[in-house]
Amino acid sequence: MYLANGLIDRLGEIILQSEAVPGISSGKSKSKAKSSARPTNPIEVVTDRNVAGLLAQRVIDSLANAGWSVNISVTPAGENIKTSATVAKLHNHWFELGYDRNTPVIALGGGTVGDVTGFAAATFLRGLPFWQAPTSIVGQVDAAIGGKVGINHTRGKNLIGCFYQPAGIVIDPSVLDTLPICERCSGLAEVVKYGVIADRTLFRACERHLESWISGDEAIPDSVIECCARIKLRIVAADETDHGLRRLLNFGHTLGHAFERWGNYRALRHGEAVALGMVGAGWMAMKRGQWSGRDFARLAAMCTLLRPRRLASFKAFDIARHLTVDKKRVRGRNIWILPRGIGRVDIRGDVTEKEIRGALTYIADWMHG
Ligand SMILES: NC(=O)c1ccc[n+]([C@@H]2O[C@H](COP(=O)([O-])OP(=O)(O)OC[C@H]3O[C@@H](n4cnc5c(N)ncnc54)[C@H](O)[C@@H]3O)[C@@H](O)[C@H]2O)c1
Ligand SMILES: [Zn+2]
């Protein structure tokens, strides 16, 4: 992982110097290799329309300066690109361009571009070298890290996919300045999540600055992005395939996913749903007596800034019935992440229907009361 302001303009040089990339001719010694390396393959950049308008030229220039011949594929923006049709389109294009197994592919964009591009790269000729250059908060602190790539299916989100680790992740926090407020909110819900599951200092920083990070009055510091990215790297390193520790990342997501399904993935952004889910899980932990009312109130105050502005009214049952199709269920049970302190959480499978009803009723009152 590479993380610093301005890296987007150094992408070409970073990839060229990486030893993970095949198809680069070089001298014998390591230092000589760096100075004399020249690409022998073209390089592919996949991005969406919004990001293309903002960053594509800078990336193309940086790659061209390092000697690459650059091809760029531009998709529409948004969740709708995560389909088998997009993957087929990319594959057809790559065959036409004669790509071989040494052709690097860069995903330049948010989590949607990263997920679909990574899946296309993983499955083309059984795998092309793949680089993540995330440009949204969600991408930089979450989606680009951990090797999960995939697309949606008519039966649900992210149901088709695989684990495919990128050759590198290049994070430039300065590109976040152009993110619209709603996307900043969505990403910041994940930042607050990292504070609760793993880092009290991060949690306190969120309490002090969340409002001005959302409005854009203050830029989100690189140290905050780096802290989250490192927490994710650490958790993924301990549990790459999601059977243990990685479940901690699901704090707020068990109810969050149910809210997203209830809203047909249109009524709420992912981060807004996670904000509701974090309040629900926090409420359960408090009612169990394992989390203080004061810490719960601190979390709820932040989630008030992150929750959806408008939401159709709902009954507990409307949301609870969507829990049964959670793909992370184990032996018919949902997995819940419940706080025990700030920076400390438990993985639980013993949450009762009564607790779920209670949490959802609390959320409904908190939203609409
Ligand atoms: N693979 C994983 O581990 C993982 C983890 C979390 C989320 N995800 C996936 O990520 C997706 C959500 O990611 P997202 O929130 O980044 O969505 P996104 O990729 O749709 O980006 C959100 C919006 O922001 C725009 N955008 C991106 N960067 C910008 C910039 N610098 N300036 C201005 N606009 C910019 C995009 O064009 C888009 O309109 C979901 O599909 C989710 O399933 C994957
Ligand atoms: Zn999430």
Image: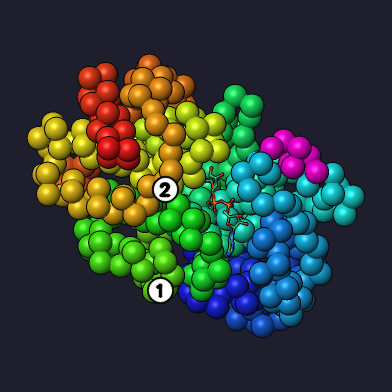
In the picture provided, is 85 more to the left or to the right than 248?
right
Q: Residue at x 53, y 62 (%)?
A: 180
**Residue 169 place in picture, x, y as percent:** 54, 61
Q: Is residue 10 left or right of residue 64?
A: left
Local crowd size for mark 2, using a 10 Å CA cut-off: few (<14), some (14–19), many (≥20) = few
Total number of numbered labels?
Answer: 2
Comparing marks 1 and 2, which lies closer to the viewer? Answer: 2
Q: Secondary structure at mark 2?
A: loop
Q: Quadrant of residue 21?
A: bottom right
Q: Position of residue 126 (x, y in %)?
A: 71, 41
Q: Does the stretch in magenta take in 275?
A: no
The numbered mark at residue 217 is 1
Q: Which residues are magenta?
A: 83-89
Q: Is residue 242 left or right of residue 346?
A: right
Main secondary structure found in the magenta portion:
helix
The image quadrant that residue 282 belongs to is top left
Residue 346, can we see it? no
